[in-house]
Amino acid sequence: MTDTAHAGHLETATGLDNRKLAIWTFIGSECLFFATLISNYLVHKETWLTGPGPFPHDAWTSPAGKVFEPIIEIPLVTLGTALLLFSSLFVVLALANAQRGNRKGLLLWLGLTLLCGVFFVGMQVYEFTHFVHKGLTLKTNLFGGSFFVLTGFHGTHVTIGVIWLFTLWIEAFRGKIPPAKSLNLEIAALYWHFVDVVWVVIFPVVYLIK
Amino acid sequence: MATTALDQQRAHAAAGHEPTGLWSWITTVDHKRIGILYGATAFTFFLMGGIEALLLRIQLGTPNNTFLSPETYNELFTMHGTTMIFLAIMPLSAAFFNFIIPLQIGARDVAFPRLNAFSYWVFLLGGLFLNASWLFGAAPDTGWFGYANLTSKQYSPGLHVDFWMLGLQTLGVASLAAAVNFFTTVLNMRAPGMKLMRMPIFTWMSFITQVLLLLAFPVITVALILLMFDRFFGTNFYVPTAGGDPLLWQHLFWIFGHPEVYILILPAFGIVSEILPVFARKPLFGYAAMVFSGIFIAFLGFGVWAHHMFATGMGPIADTYFSLATMLIAIPTGVKIFNWLGTVWGGSIQYKTPVYFALGFVAMFIIGGLSGVMHGSPPADLQQTDTYFVVAHFHYVMFGGSIFGLTAGAYYWWPKMFGRVLDEGLGKLHFWLMLIGFNLTFFPMHILGLNGMPRRVYTYPEGLGFEELNLLETVAAFVLAASFAVFLYNIIKTWRGPRNAPADPWNAATLEWAIPSPPQEWNFAEIPVVHGRDPLWEAKRERGGPLPEPPRVSGAGIHMPNPSYWPLVTALGLSAMMSGLMLIHHLGPWGIIAGGAILLFGVFNWAFEPAG
């Protein structure tokens, strides 16, 4: 960051912009939020007394002989995960273009970031609907409850990120994100990276580990 | 109309005048006004919580009393605890964070003035939401800790728990927003030369409190979300018959709840550490040890939660660890107590009201701390769990600690906040009534508890030897209440007097006393440069006497943030969402969607409004 990027701002005691320090602080707090949700999932994923047992990776047969097919579909979610990870790269490129004052590059890379984010949210909507059709809801068992709450709150975070980045895309389109204001994008990007990193934890914990 | 008024106000502010009128308070982003709003609101809630306590004491004054029904008794003790913790002590501390921290670090405002207003409005609306439960005859009745499965749909089908869980969720948003704000403010807004190890000790303890808030509140947020899903959407996280675990609630609650008790006490530590040196005319003894013991207490505070759960039978290994970790906290706390003693030792103590309350704090907190160490031993704790001994312990730390400390702070900073010095005679009367009333109310609870009187039970039979001490406690509780009547009278009396407090009535050491009382909107006409820990004492020493009274100056040319009503709109949207959640079975998702729309509308207008 050059000094020109901070033109018009008061100097801070740490040299970090207030908003940047605040978003890092918020992210630190959010770590505890997701850590608690992930712990709740780990505690509950294989626990049940009523209803069908958990059937993420293996089929589960009820005493009456009813079979619940394994529900998790790794290929689709892997694609969503990959796109979300790429979107982190894209938002970095968008920021680099914003700092250089290249509006076209900024719009392109930020647009791609948004597409990835929208795909991820769409994938989750599809996945949730699909699960409900196959008989897994919040109420089915503790696996269902803790799965939907954990991935649902992550999905909510992604959705908020998409709304935020879309607002910035419109601003960029109207030419309102000159290099001196690229910090606006940098803060949203930090949030976006955090949401990606959380998914990097959730994906193996929920989908890959049996 | 609204915009016109706001424009007028901006023009007014630009001309260097301070805005007045109701609208100026609704749109204020001035940390000092927000601090006063926090203080006034929290003190009102404190009086409500006090009245709830008096009703409880009347019921317990005589055996087999029928003054309150068991159901009302449950509601009153739940609301008393919830109110005192979330609506009184925390926001009273927040009042001091708001008013004092920017002044102590030599800043013109906090890092995010509008976010600060948002925190206040969310706190106010959350408090009103929680207390609205009284109007629906559905006040929370499961204790401030809301143990599962007392809170399950099966055992509490009414609205009681819904009010509690959504109210606390709202208050959590306020606390987190404020914590992000003050964490950033303390790190970033310090005046030139104010290194971390030159920060006033109140700012230090408050800073540590923000870290605790940031790390503890997300955990209760998730715990409450899980409870909400259990109650509204049919999950079974805390329902044992479906394989869920009610102990999960206890773990999550106390992982939040133990740091929470340090959130309640650390600001009071800071206040007392600020007052004792000023009135002993000596620098704080062991400044660095005070800072690091505060950090150590906060760090250990995250590793001791299960000492609230010895009675659940966790096994010898967990019991041993949590017992040892708990007793370890006595070391940094002891360091603090000896440093306070070292500060007053050999000092020429000025016996003013703030120092009475500060010394009262030290004495009362030692008693509460010692009974805390007793609970740290599992065998002793098993004997004391669920008895009045525990009630005695936490009132000695919460009232004897936090409230004594906060009251000391009120007397100490009152001249700075309002330009009036509170009456000394009435202040000392307040102190003695409070000290005597407090001890006669709560000390006998140790004895009653050890004799087996259970807490949370609405009455007790005759002939168990509980009668005399209970009656004494009830009478003393009214003495305690009377002490706050004296305080109120003192406030009113002083209010009618002239606004004539000097900038530095106590000959103090920190920056807030370098500016007029009450400070002008922009605090410092010129941002100060700091060369040491006690900047004002150093300036006076250099000058060889007291500093001249700082003049009130014109603020023309000083750039201050614009007033805004968007924080209030956003806070209203958030509360509407919570109300929509509560009514989900009547309105479907539409209440939440309407609230969410207001919230988004507020956020976008906030983001695109010129911040100034």
Image (cartoon, coloured by chain):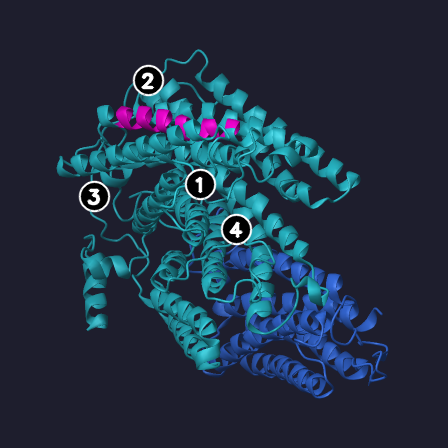
Residue at x 44%, y 79% (from the top left corner): B586
Q: Is residue A165 left or right of residue B512?
A: right
> What kind of element bears circle 4?
loop
Task: Tell me residue B374's x, y (percent).
Answer: 62, 29
Residue A15: mark? 4
The answer for which chain carries disc 3 is B
Labelled pair 2, 4 in contact (Cβ < 8 Å):
no
Reading the image, the residue beneath label 2 is: B350
Relative placement, left or right, of B550 versus B364 is left
Majority SS type along the magenta span: helix
| Residue B192: assigned label | 1
Task: Please determine if labels 4 and 1 lie on a single subunit.
Answer: no
Q: Residue at x 36, y 21 (%)?
A: B279
In-front residue for pair B119/A149: A149
Task: Using the numbered discs, state the Cα–Cα distance from disc 4 to disc 3 in whole angstroms.
Answer: 30 Å
Does residue B494 appear to the left or right of A122 in the view shown? left
Q: Quadrant of the N terminus of chain B?
A: bottom left
Q: Nearer the viewer, residue B338 or B585?
A: B585
Judging by the rendered image, the residue that carries numbered circle 3 is: B553
In the rendered image, the residue lying farthest to the top is B346
Label disc, if present, on residue B34 of the rendered structure? none
Report whether residue B283 is seen.
Answer: yes
Q: Chain B appears what colour? A: cyan
Q: Amino acid at mark 3?
A: Val
Res B531 visible: no
